[in-house]
Image (cartoon, rainbow, N blue to C red):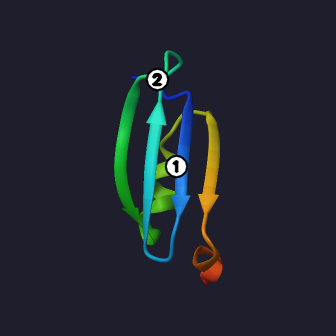
Amino acid sequence: MKIAIVGLDLAKNLLQVHAVDLQGHIVVRKQLRRADVLRYFATLEPCVIGMQACGSSHYWRV
């Protein structure tokens, strides 16, 4: 399973991750909590990441 493109839908608490391979086949479809996002992406090989967000997603505070 080689991830080529990841789509990340930002939100306040639960984020949606959707990833496809070079042929466009879905390889990942999952929800992540904000606290798990960095840990998840740190384990991935380099790939293209696209982010989509609604107005309320910009509430991120550390």
N-terminal of the two: label 2 or label 1?
A: 2
Badge 1: few (under 14), some or many (20 or more) residues near its Cα, within 10 Å? few
Where 20 falls versus 56 (above or below)? above
- C-alpha distance separating marks 2 and 1: 14 Å
Dividing the image into 4 quarters, which one contains the C terminus? bottom right
Relative placement, left or right, of 23 versus 48 is: left
- Furthest residue toward top: 23
Residue 29: quadrant of the picture: top left
The residue to which callout 1 is attached is 41
Provide the residue designation for mark 2: 2
Q: Quadrant of residue 14?
A: bottom left
Q: Is residue 37 visible?
A: yes
- The residue lying toward the viewer, choosing from 60 and 9, is 9
Q: Residue furthest front?
A: 54
Q: Quadrant of the N terminus?
A: top left
Q: Is mark 1 on a helix, strand or loop?
A: helix
